[in-house]
Image: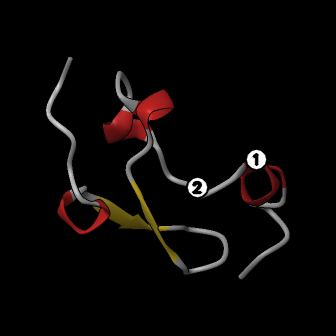
Amino acid sequence: MGRMRKKSDLPSKICETCGLPFTWRKKWERDWDSVRYCSERCRRSKSKSA
């Protein structure tokens, strides 16, 4: 099994829609470089925000 990491050691980004920080998730492992939104809700409402 892989080494467990503390949440503070994981990479993070700022959501383009809501502006809040979010951290790396296992499901984004393959395409972390292209992740721009913290949630499906933010991704769907991307055109509604400033």
Q: Amino acid at mark 1?
A: Glu
Tell which of 1 and 38 is nearer to you: 1
4 vs 10: above or below: above
Q: Nearer the viewer, residue 30 or 33?
A: 30
Q: Tell me the amino acid under the disc marked 2.
A: Tyr
Residue at x 65%, y 70% (from the top left corner): 17
Q: Is 35 left or right of 44, judged from the image as shown?
A: left
Q: Residue furthest top?
A: 1
Measured from the top left, where is residue 20 in percent x and y? 54, 79
Between 1 and 37, the one lying in front of the other is 1
Relative to 41, 5 lies left or right: left
Residue at image position (55%, 68%) is 16
Residue at point 68%, 53% (across, down): 39
Judging by the rendered image, the residue that carries numbered circle 2 is 37
As drawn, is 18 to the left or to the right of 13? right
**Side (left or right) of 42 relative to 12:** right
The quarter in which the C terminus is drawn is bottom right
User: Where does the image place residue 6, in percent across and percent down from the top left?
Assistant: 23, 59
**Disc 2 secondary structure class:** loop
Q: Are marks 2 and 1 in contact (CB under 8 Å)?
A: yes
Q: Quadrant of the N terminus?
A: top left
Residue denoted by label 1? 40
Residue 29 placement: quadrant? top left
